[in-house]
């Protein structure tokens, strides 16, 4: 039965519903055919069965529905006519004016064919045939897009591919074209002699081109990246991406991924050849250009050797300090490489690790960067057989090497006992006892700039002990149609004088009082410094809950019971007998509003020393985010880990129609001499702006993004970058 070309490529739904499962009796085996019909005629001489009136047939998982079916039992040919639909075991449904099938209902030919794939795509053609499950159609069109709108009315797909011939292989899950034309929004935009892509089932894995990326930046000019995907095996693949630039030499990017029975790993990297300037923030950077190979490598993986043992690792390395920024890969200023073997069971934990850091900061000295190997930590939990508390034993060892700096080795063994009890009045009381013995060795101490971090050269020992009692007393009641919970908290800690400045400080430098460490036994962030003396810490938590609304707040302060000078730097909030006041408040209203505010107030003047706020407002499609941070601690500028700063970050997205949205973000550095005396900014220094327009529906993603960078480091210059992204969904490879 002939049809016009317009009808032959009609991708719209047919009026005939597919035959449902159970529409005819199920066959006993794959060789048996079962059917049902309103009328049945059998010609004994010709062995022809004619069924008419809502005919249903099933064989080997293939289901057919038609107005009339003629089955020649001698030849095995089945001819079906009128309101046709055939569903194969994979869920693909074929519609047509007439079908000529084998009696397996699997193979055959059809006119005015529409093939609706289980993965969501659909093929329409003037004529088609299926042989051994592979469908070949002529004068065809394919689209994965919706063909009806939200009201159920027919509409043209956003994009489609028309071709002289199309082949669908359900085993390879691929669709291949000859003489293909890509039409988007009704206009033909691309012609290709051949094309192949997955059928949308999610299991296609053949090699092929991926979606290209287009970008323009002041630094590199126009960039075109065309990825090619290689399926090496079901568990291994390789993606090669050549990058071509108008202003610099081409680059090659690669990513290799593998999965095995124990875990997964991946290796990625990029390489090119070019010149670079010395890393400097000055806009007038001059100096000898260093020409040569530039690139980076990124490796990570994780393997589960048995139920207890796991090995994981990652490594990020780059040839120079500006490569990642110049080629818009990352803006990280430190790259960390790690290796870690862990054993975890019900009562113990063992970690044998190592790490190294590559600093990309402008003035960083590479020889001062630490290399930790090994870093060993073992913990064992036991039940106290006498009082019923919990005991945790810990052994730790760390060796830090530097190619041009201070070397430190550390080992300690410690024990912590904890007992939690509830009083008849509902108070939760926790008793803690802690003891530790440390042994340190350090050399080349003069290479460390900050004197308080050096410690004494040679061997140094130290003993640590502490006891603590922590009491919480929650009060619960109803208010404003919800439930409130007020929990006063008091903690007392006592620890004898401890050697600190004789010990090198490698892991306890970035100390700052905040709500998360207010009630900690040791408010230094690492092991190398210990807070000794006696203190009392007090505060309160308040929570209010009602449907779709939650409010939480905590505030507290501590007081040292001794007048011994503190080793905390002035400005951290812990240097005086009274600490600064710290707190945190969170507000949540359904999924529409979330606010978090952290603060630290000066103990005497109530000046804000730390002010941090994060706000998220809106839905998943339309939202705004805002973040503000100001550190005004006035800490000695010689302590490089505790510099003050101020910044604001804004971002948002507005979806102004069903598929269209606009988005943007900005980061502004507000740090000036008032926050950091050595700051070079004037108090309002934009860091980065971004603005974009996005179209995103069920089968197409089209986006345009503008970004402006204001920071300049060497050959990674400030300027504008434009990115064009076109992603035809289900046409990825």
Image: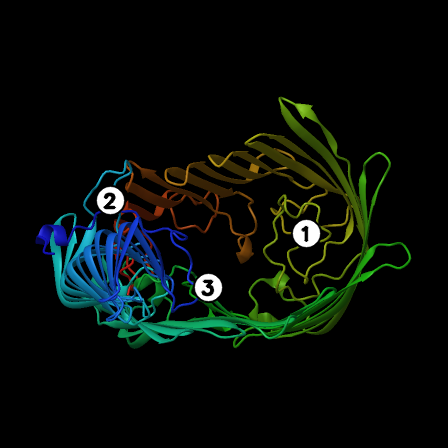
The colour scheme used to paint the residues is rainbow
Question: What crowding class fits label 2: few (fewer than 14 Cα within 10 Å), some (14-19), or many (20 or more)?
Answer: few
Q: Of 411 and 368, which appears nearest the observer?
A: 411
Residue extending farthest to the front is 45
Q: Residue at x 81, y 36 (%)?
A: 426
Above or below, comparing residue 155 to residue 393 in the picture: above
Above or below, comparing residue 681 to residue 272 in the picture: above
Left or right of residue 405, residue 161 in this image:
left
Q: CA distance from mark 2 to mark 3?
A: 61 Å
Pinpoint residue 725: horizontal percent, then vertical percent. 25, 55
Pinpoint residue 204: horizontal percent, then vertical percent. 34, 66
- Earlier in the chain: of badge 1 and badge 3, it is 3
Left or right of residue 31, residue 493 in this image:
right
Residue extending farthest to the right is 386
Q: Tag on residue 399?
A: none
Residue extending farthest to the top is 480
- Earlier in the chain: of badge 1 and badge 2, it is 2
Q: Which residue is mark 1?
A: 523
- Placement of the C terminus among the 4 image quadrants: bottom left
Q: Tag on residue 334?
A: 3
Left or right of residue 472, residue 332 in this image:
left
> Is disc 1 placed on a helix, strand or loop?
loop
Q: Which residue is mark 2?
A: 15
Q: Residue at x 48, y 44 (%)?
A: 675
Question: What crowding class fits label 3: few (fewer than 14 Cα within 10 Å), some (14-19), or many (20 or more)?
Answer: few
> Would you identify the image quadrant in which residue 120 lies?
bottom left
Q: Is residue 723 visible?
A: no
Q: CA distance from mark 1 to mark 2?
A: 72 Å
């Amino acid at each position: 039965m002939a049809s016009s070309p317009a009808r032959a490529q009609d991708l719209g739904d047919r009026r005939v519903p597919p035959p449902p499962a159970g529409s005819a009796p199920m066959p006993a085996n794959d060789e048996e055919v079962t059917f049902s019909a309103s009328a049945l005629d059998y010609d004994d001489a010709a062995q022809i069965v004619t069924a008419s009136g809502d005919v249903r047939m099933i064989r080997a998982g293939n289901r057919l529905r038609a107005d009339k079916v003629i089955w020649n039992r001698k030849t095995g040919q089945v001819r079906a006519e009128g309101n046709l639909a055939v569903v194969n075991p994979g869920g693909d449904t074929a519609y047509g004016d007439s079908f000529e099938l084998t009696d397996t209902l699997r193979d055959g030919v059809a006119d005015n064919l529409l093939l609706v794939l289980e993965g969501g795509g659909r093929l329409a053609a003037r004529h088609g045939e299926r042989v051994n499950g592979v469908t070949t159609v002529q004068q065809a069109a394919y689209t994965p897009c919706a063909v009806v709108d939200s009201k159920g009315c027919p509409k043209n797909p956003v994009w489609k591919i028309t071709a002289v011939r199309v082949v669908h292989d359900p085993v390879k899950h691929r669709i291949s074209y000859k003489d293909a034309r890509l039409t988007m929004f009704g206009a033909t935009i691309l012609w290709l002699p051949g094309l192949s892509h997955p059928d949308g089932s999610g299991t296609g894995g053949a090699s092929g081109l991926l979606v290209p990326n287009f970008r323009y930046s002041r630094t590199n000019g126009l960039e075109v990246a065309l990825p090619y995907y290689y399926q090496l095996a079901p568990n291994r693949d390789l993606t090669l991406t050549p990058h071509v630039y108008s202003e610099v030499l081409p680059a090659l990017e690669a990513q290799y991924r593998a999965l095995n029975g124990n875990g997964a790993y991946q290796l990625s990297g990029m390489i090119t050849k070019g010149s670079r300037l010395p890393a400097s923030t000055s806009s007038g950077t001059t100096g000898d250009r260093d020409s040569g190979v530039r690139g980076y490598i990124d490796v990570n993986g994780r393997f589960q050797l048995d139920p207890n043992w796991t090995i994981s690792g990652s490594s990020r390395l780059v040839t120079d300090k500006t490569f990642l920024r110049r080629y818009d890969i990352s803006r990280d200023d430190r790259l960390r490489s790690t290796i870690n073997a862990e054993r975890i069971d019900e009562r113990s934990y063992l970690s044998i690790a190592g790490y190294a850091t590559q600093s990309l900061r402008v003035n960083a000295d590479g020889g001062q960067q630490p290399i930790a190997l090994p870093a060993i930590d073992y913990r064992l939990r036991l039940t106290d057989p006498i009082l019923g508390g919990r005991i945790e034993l810990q052994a730790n060892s760390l060796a830090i090497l530097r190619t041009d700096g201070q070397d430190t080795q550390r080992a300690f063994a410690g024990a912590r006992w904890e007992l939690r009890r509830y009083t008849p009045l509902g108070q939760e009381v926790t008793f803690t006892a802690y003891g530790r013995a440390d042994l340190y060795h350090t050399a080349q101490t003069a290479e460390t700039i900050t004197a308080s971090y050096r410690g004494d050269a040679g061997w140094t020992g130290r003993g640590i002990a502490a006891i603590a009692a922590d009491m919480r007393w929650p009060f619960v009641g109803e208010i404003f149609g919800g439930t409130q919970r007020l929990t006063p908290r008091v903690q007392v800690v006592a620890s004898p004088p401890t050697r600190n400045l004789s010990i090198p400080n490698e892991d306890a430098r970035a100390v700052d009082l905040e709500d998360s460490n207010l009630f900690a036994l040791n408010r230094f962030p690492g092991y190398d410094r210990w807070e000794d003396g006696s203190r009392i810490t007090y505060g309160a938590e308040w929570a209010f809950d009602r449907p779709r609304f939650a409010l939480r707040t905590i505030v507290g302060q501590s007081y040292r019971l001794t007048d011994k000078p503190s080793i905390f730097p002035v400005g951290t909030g812990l240097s005086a007998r009274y600490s600064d006041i710290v707190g945190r408040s969170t507000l949540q209203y359904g999924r529409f509003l979330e606010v978090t505010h952290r603060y630290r107030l000066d103990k005497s003047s109530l000046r804000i020393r730390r002010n941090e706020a994060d706000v998220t407002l809106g839905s998943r499609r339309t939202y705004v985010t805002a973040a503000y941070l100001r550190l005004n601690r006035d800490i000695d500028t010689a302590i490089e880990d505790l510099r003050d700063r101020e910044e604001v970050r804004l971002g948002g997205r507005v979806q102004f129609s069903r598929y269209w949205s606009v988005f943007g973000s900005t980061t502004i550095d507000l740090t000036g001499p008032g926050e950091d005396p050595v700051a070079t900014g004037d108090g309002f220094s934009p860091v980065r702006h971004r603005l974009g327009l996005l179209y995103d529906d069920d089968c197409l993603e089209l986006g345009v993004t503008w970004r402006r960078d204001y920071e300049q480091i060497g050959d990674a210059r400030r300027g504008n970058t434009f990115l064009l992204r076109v992603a035809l969904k289900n046409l990825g490879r």
